Amino acid sequence: MATSQSSGSSPVTPTTSAVQIQNLHYSFGSGDLTKQVLFDINLTLPRGQIVIMTGPSGSGKTTLLTLIGALRTVHAGSLQVLGQEVVGLSRRKLVSVRRNIGFIFQAHNLFESLTAAQNVEMAVELKGQFGTKRSQAVEILDKLGLSDRVDYKPGSLSGGQKQRVAIARALVNHPLLILADEPTAALDKKSGRDVVTLMQKLAKEENHTILMVTHDNRILDVADRIINLVDGRLESDENLDTFVSTHDPKSLDRRMFIM
Amino acid sequence: MLSWWKRTPLAWLNLTHDRRKFATSMAGVGFAVLLMFLFTGFQNALYDSQVQLINRLNADIIIINRLKNNMFVPAAFARRRLYQAQALAGVQAAYPLYMSDVRWRNPVTRKTRPVRVLAFNLADPVLPLPGVTAHLEALKFPNTALIDTRARAEVGPREAGIQSELADRAIEIVGTFRLGTDFAAGNGNLIMSDQNFLRYFANRGPEEDERSFSTVDIGLVQVQPGVDVDEMVQALSAFLPNDVKVMRRLGPGNSFEAQERDYWRESTNIAFVFSLLTVMSFFVGIILVYQILYTDVADHWKEYATLKAMGYSNRFLLTVVMQEALILSVVGFIPGILVSRLLYTAASNAIGLVFLMTPARITHMYLAAFAMCLISGAIAVRKVQSTDPAEVFS
Ligand SMILES: Nc1ncnc2c1ncn2[C@@H]1O[C@H](COP(=O)(O)OP(=O)(O)O)[C@@H](O)[C@H]1O
Ligand SMILES: [Mg+2]
């Protein structure tokens, strides 16, 4: 099941896909210490798709995410992000690719010294939109159900609220691509679920593409597609239809209720 | 990268978020500034104190014995040189100032201490200090003098009405003035009329120099309005015999003040010691500020990496750290200079030397504090630069 099986079997043009990866290899270290982590990855993420990536720990999920996020320099294969070839780009050019991507991490990584709004405004300032930064921040925080926490500092917010501020910061610039690495890992069941539902809602509203790494079976239902990475290789790639047909939907629902 | 004023003031907020840490940082930088102020203060006080008297003399040009290369040298010169000078066109007036070191008895402890007596014709405006002009009439009485309120405590009470002994003769203090002590002044200065000077110093016994009006310690020359002082110095030097030296009173180059400063600078190691201490304080400051900035970067490692992942450049983060350095230099300087002022006053009162905080010295000190923070910032910044944005995912 190593074949790339995107939502259609017809070739996808760069303008319609958010991410297009061909024959991507990646290794850490050099010389005798070289350790190859990703092997011959081929993957296309069409715009607007919500994709969940699963796989055992150490299989290379985070590494793949950092490559797609233009956080590392890549030398082999082809990796197009939002129509821009990332392989061979200089560090400086990588920075401008990142500005179109929303990152969400396991930890919220908010500045304790800034209020929720100010943390979000830091993202708006990247676009130079100083005049409207406050209203943009308030609007997105409102959408995430934080309208009464706008001027609170992270120290007086709950874990779920902090993660929602981090999501607001990732989404405020309407990025076409959102990369999330275990965004619910630090949250309890209820707030994890809430956070993901909000992400799904906002992504669907604005036709964002989401690639989310998670071990959390309870949230698989938000995905249009689920890919599985094992030992640096793409082992399975199922769209939701396939997923539903191979798993009894009722049992899936039931499983979600149990957890 | 422009329009910093529209941005979220991240540097300021990060520094001030933890109030207690901010206060500690402020105190740390302030302490380094205080140390630098203190050591440079002592160094400057040494020089400034030596020229206090010279600064107050009422003259454009000074004539002294060629051998007198600092105020300690007791060499006097013939008074007729002053008459010769006065005859030259462009000279308005020439006044003699007599000086002598002598034993003064502390009226309370009865111990004798060396002091310096300054004497001049009361009709000549030699030392127009407020205390002096107010007591000219009283000084006309025999065996009277004025005492410097800033003389050392060793001389006893520094106030009018004191009766004591000078060179084993009775003397009455009829008033006070304010000048300050230097190394050549012993424990302080007394001022008396030239007539009284003769009473005390004309017949001091076989061991001591006898003084008369025929020799002068310092000649004060005033030029007529509109006459160029430097040209007058040239003219007088050419005109007068070689046994005297003619120079401007103040200013850089060939001046009485510069000669005195240079003598102390070149003949003592004190300046070197204090310079060394100042430089050491500067480095202590660098280490302190580096600690503060490094801790900030280390504590916010993930957040800074996140900013990089979001698309902020290295330069932005460097600017944030440098802003923090700049803020620290300002907020540390303010308490530093305030406490320094208090200590300057206290030190000045205790030892009688002048501790001056001139605008130029304050500016230099701020620049030093700024450089201190800038250097620390530049070292700490390397830490931010090495932040790998991919690490936010780990
Ligand atoms: N910075 C790094 N340097 C060297 N090896 C790394 C680095 N980051 C990850 N690895 C290795 O790469 C492999 C994949 O790691 P990772 O992408 O974090 O896996 P996952 O996110 O699926 O748990 C692991 O074996 C890990 O030890
Ligand atoms: Mg991982």
Image (cartoon, coloured by chain):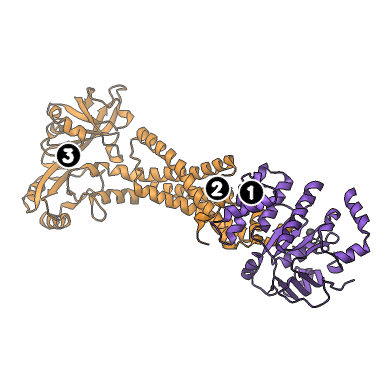
The extreme front residue here reads A205
| Parent chain of label 2 | B
Residue lying at 26% horizontally and 36% vertically, measured from the top left = B179
Residue neighbourhood size for the residue with mark 3, other residues' Cα within 10 Å, grouped as few (<14), some (14–19), many (≥20): many
Residue neighbourhood size for the residue with mark 1, other residues' Cα within 10 Å, grouped as few (<14), some (14–19), many (≥20): many
Compare marks 2 and 3 and give the one earlier in the sequence.
3
State which mark lies toward you, 3 or 1.
Answer: 1
Residue neighbourhood size for the residue with mark 2, other residues' Cα within 10 Å, grouped as few (<14), some (14–19), many (≥20): many
Front residue (pair B247, B379) = B379
Mark identifier at residue B98: 3
**Does the residue tagged 1 have its C-beta within 8 Å of any atom of ligand 2?**
no
Q: Chain B is drawn in which colour?
A: orange
Residue lying at 7% horizontally and 47% vertically, measured from the top left = B83
Residue lying at 20% horizontally and 34% vertically, measured from the top left = B130
- The amino acid marked with disc number 1 is Ala
Give a yes or no on whether discs 3 and 1 share a subunit: no
Q: What element carries label 2?
A: helix
| Parent chain of label 1 | A
Q: Mark 1 points at which residue?
A: A116
Q: Mark 2 points at which residue?
A: B288
- The amino acid marked with disc number 2 is Leu
**Does the image show residue A188?**
no
Q: Chain A is drawn in which colour?
A: purple
Mark identifier at residue A189: none
Give a yes or no on whether discs 2 and 1 share a subunit: no
Q: What element carries label 1?
A: helix
| Parent chain of label 3 | B
Front residue (pair B294, A171) = A171
Percent x, y for residue B288?
A: 55, 47
